[in-house]
Amino acid sequence: MKRSIFMYLFFFATLWIVFQYVNNVKVYENQEKQIEKLKSQAKSNQQLADSLSSRMSDAEYFTIKGNDNAYAYFEKSGQDLDVFVPKIVEGIYALTTKDGNRLIPFEGGIRPFQINKVQLLNHRWLIADFSDGKRWGEILVQFYVDEDGGITYETVDSLIYPE
């Protein structure tokens, strides 16, 4: 009887070990598949990040932040870019009155044209988007900063998109 109990115990222990081994192998294989899947996702995410980074650097090429020469100009003149850029942009928006913006050489149809967005290109030029709610256009503006800090704006060119 003692012998049969040990035999059943041995048989049960063997089955238990085989069950644990098979279960662990399945868990290991599932983890390996998940690791491979995550590695491929990480690789595709890295490629996407690299692509977006490249596109961002291309998009910022014609901005004040992407223009090293304009940035050097501000460093040499002792002006802080974080203070100067908002001052220029606020100056453009401040030129907008109830009759429109004097920099926009077009008559508004529904209402006067107003500047929607401004992008500084370098230390002398900016481009601005404008609309009257129905028609849209863009202007290229040259600006000058006086020694006393005053800013003068002058429209270089403009266009309005057809309806």
Image (cartoon, grey):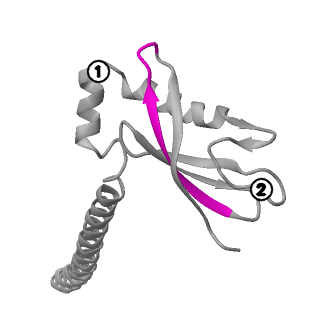
Which amino acid, by three-letter code, is at mark 2? Gly
Residue 10 appears in which quarter of the rendering?
A: bottom left
Q: In this view, does 82 lie above or below 65?
A: above
Q: Is mark 1 on a helix, strand or loop?
A: helix
Residue 163 is inside the magenta segment = no
Residue at 59%, 36% in the rendered image = 92
Q: Nearer the viewer, residue 158 or 79?
A: 158
The residue where tag 1 is placed is 77
Answer whether residue 2 is visible to the viewer in this image.
no
Q: Is residue 37 left or right of residue 127?
A: left
What whole-number distance in Å separates the C-alpha atoms at marks 2 and 1? 39 Å
Q: Nearer the viewer, residue 150 or 36?
A: 150
Q: What element carries label 2?
A: loop
Q: Give the magenta-colored segment's residue range.
A: 136-148
- Main SS, magenta residues: strand
The residue where tag 2 is placed is 108
Residue 155 position, x and y percent, is 53, 45
Residue at 46%, 13% in the rendered image = 148
